[in-house]
Amino acid sequence: MRSIYIQSLTAGLSNADGISEFWDKIKQLILKTLYDPLYKSVSNDYSDMFSLLNTQVNDATTNIYSGPRYWGGGLPFGTVQKVAENICIPIAAAFITVIFCWELIHMVQESNSMSSENAKPKKLMLVLMKFGLCLLVCAKSFDIIMAFFDVGAWASMKLGEFSSSSIRGFTVDLNNALLENPDVYTVEDLMQLCGYKIMLFFGKLGVCVCGVIVYIRIMLWFLEILLYASTAPIPYSTWINKEWSQVGMNYTRKMLALSFEGFFMLLLFAIYGSVLAGLSQGDFMQNMVMIIGCGFALAVMMFKTGNISASIFNAH
């Protein structure tokens, strides 16, 4: 009897182990069925986020390279050029005439101070030469300002050649966070993937927001350049007079600062790309924090490039 009881108990335990093993297999099959497509979806979202990030950077870089000259099909640039040539140049001519008369009056006053040196014709010729040069500069002032921008664009393109790999060369593998084919599927890994899916949704949303902010900043930069360039003949009309020439000098420094804002924007992209280039060995959470945090820092710093460039060229 005892042997029969032991055999039946052993058979029952074997059946229980078999049932437990059967349910474990069912559980692993269910988890695998949920885990594999979710892993692929998260991996695709991860790749899409970086593709979107690269697209935003590339589009911003292309806009900076093209500049305001080709923005909107060149129509805004053509409008501003017509304003500068047909409205601001006549105003500048009036200013030059007033300042030229002022110079002549000042020269006559000096010649009446019993100084024979000031009455020589060479001083009158000097004033006439200044008048002629000022007219020439005012007539070509818009082209001069665009030449300043061409210098800044050349510097931006050289920076792009130097740092192109650091801007576009960053990728992250999801295998650093979770294995694609683990030996044992667990509910914890499945829930972790769900958390990653949610974070990637907000991550892609954050990248889109940063891209919109960067685009708006570049368009504001274009508008500022065009607005300043449209009035270029007026400040350049003050160069004929020593006291008033500071207006033209301050304007020139301001335009140089504006021309190099694109250079500093591209430098920010290069720094951002260099930071992201080292993410492939990091943790998923750390990577997401760096991507989104540095992205918003980049967007904020884009609005500070104007102050940085103005400080360098003393254009305040």
Image (cartoon, rainbow, N blue to C red):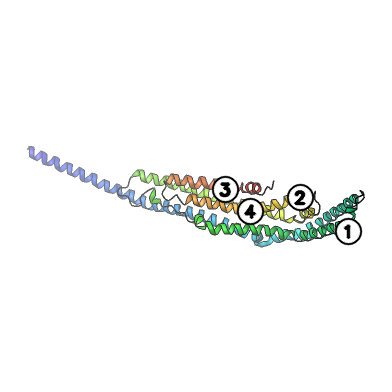
- Give the mark nearer the N terminus: 3 vs 4: 4
Q: Callout 3: helix, strand or loop?
A: helix
> Which of the two marks, 3 or 4, is nearer to us in this view?
4
Q: Where is residue 112 shown, x and y percent of the image?
A: 92, 50
User: In the image shown, does 37 or 270 lie closer to the viewer?
Assistant: 270
Circle 1 sits on which residue?
Answer: 121
User: Marks 1 and 3: which is nearer the front?
Assistant: 1
Q: Amino acid at mark 1?
A: Pro
| Residue with the mark numbered 4 | 260
Q: Which badge, 1 or 4, is on the more N-terminal residue? A: 1
Q: CA distance from mark 1 to mark 3?
A: 60 Å
Q: What amino acid type should be assigned to the residue bearing mark 3? A: Ala
Cβ–Cβ under 8 Å for marks 1 and 4 = no
Residue 40 horizontal/vertical position (percent): 40, 53
Cβ–Cβ under 8 Å for marks 3 and 4? no
Whether pointer 2 and pointer 3 mark residues with C-beta atoms closer than 8 Å, the reply is no
Q: Which residue is mark 3?
A: 299
Front position among marks 2 and 1: 1
Which percent across, then down, holds residue 272?
52, 50
Q: CA distance from mark 4 to mark 2?
A: 20 Å
Q: Report the amino acid beneath label 4.
A: Phe
SS at circle 4 = loop
Residue drawn at (11%, 39%), measured in percent from left and top? Answer: 6
Residue 247: mark in rendering: 2
